[in-house]
Image: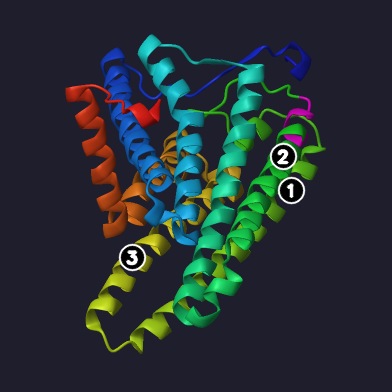
Amino acid sequence: MPNSSSISEFLLLPLADTRQLQLLHFWLLLGIYLAALLGNGLISTAVACDRRLHTPMYFFLLNLALLDLGCISTTLPKAMANALWDTRAISYAGCAAQIFFFLLFFSAEFSLLTIMSYDRYVAICKPLHYGTLMDSRACATMVAAAWGVAVVYSLLHTASTFSLPLCQGNVVNQFFCEIPQILKLSCSESNLRELVLIIFSVSLAFGCFVFMVVSYVQIFLAVLRMPSEQGRHKTFSTCLPHLAVVSLFIITGIYAYLKPPSVSSPSSDLMMALLYSVVPPAVNPLIYSMRNQEVKDAIRKVISKFVSIAVNGPSFRIHDL
């Protein structure tokens, strides 16, 4: 059997058995990818360009949009290329890089979602202290901490995974390189170390999820005391979809990483991977931003400006030169 030193590439799970279905999956994934790029790109541009959106909440939304772009760009382009060219291969270095960036963006995103739930809790339940607790320095520190912890976490996970000897072949039963699938190729008892790290990570993620649920429960209790029915409806219509996407993210992620091998199958593994790696980055722009009137107004301005430039060409004034 080959060992890790002789493996130069891995073979990913094909999305379909026939050429026609492969091309269909390519166009479906391309549509999802372009929609995610457009939505998150518009949000990033709108928040960066509109001074009215330079507040803590929209600062977090900007970072969330950038993380979503990174998340979906880590997995889908390679899957689309394999489907288009009818290949399965990914290089050893490419697989390691995919795992590193996948863990980096997703762990940073989950940390950011936790921070955003705290931001909404302070804004609604402690509005008089909001300016003190969520000033620009505190927001920048929290986001920097989320990115820093994600970098260290992804480095440890990736190094631990690829330090294991791999002697069970090079076939990865997933459309991208995923740690549980790589561990199945290991023949070493030392993979217990990586399993312990996964269990610790999932426990930490579940703790963050509980924190988010408690924060939203406090928000809902505060909202129910509001005299304005319109305000209650607006808050519920915003917070409930947040919880739904986060719940989908954490439940499918935990299932993918902690499920017993006996209940594993390529079809169920593929479905779970799509649910936690593709769906959240694609729908987050709709849930977190497109329902917000201020963001929609800013996006309209950005689109109208681009359309004006495309139709009339860039206009320069003397004082711009």
Tag 2: Cα neighbours inside 10 Å, few (<14), some, or many (≥20)? Answer: many
Q: Residue at x 55, y 61 (%)?
A: 114
Disc 2/disc 1 C-alpha distance (Å): 8 Å
Q: Secondary structure at mark 1?
A: helix
Q: Residue at x 63, y 36 (%)?
A: 179
Return the x and y of residue 238 as percentages of the image width and height: 33, 65
Q: Left or right: 133 with respect to 16?
A: right
The label number, if any, that marks residue 238 in the structure image:
3
Of the image marks 3 and 1, the number of the one nearer the N terminus:
1
Q: Is residue 307 magenta?
A: no
Q: Which residue is most to the front? A: 318
Of the image marks 2 and 1, the number of the one nearer the N terminus:
2
Q: Residue type at mark 1?
A: Leu
Q: Answer whether labels 2 and 1 touch (C-beta < 8 Å).
A: yes
Q: Secondary structure at mark 2?
A: helix
Return the x and y of residue 100 as percentages of the image width and height: 64, 33
Q: Nearer the viewer, mark 2 or mark 1?
A: 2
Q: Residue at x 33, y 87 (%)?
A: 226
- The residue that label 2 is drawn on is 157
Return the x and y of residue 51 as percentages of the image width and height: 40, 52
Of the image marks 3 and 2, the number of the one nearer the N terminus:
2
State which region is magenta: 160-165
Q: Is residue 251 above or below residue 150?
A: below
Q: Which residue is nearer to you in this view: 320 or 210?
A: 320
Q: Is residue 82 above or below residue 319?
A: above
Q: Residue type at mark 3?
A: Thr
Q: Pick the quarter of the image with the N terminus.
A: top right
Q: Which residue is nearer to you in this view: 117 or 208?
A: 117
Q: Nearer the viewer, mark 3 or mark 1?
A: 3
Q: Residue type at mark 2?
A: His
- The residue that label 1 is drawn on is 197
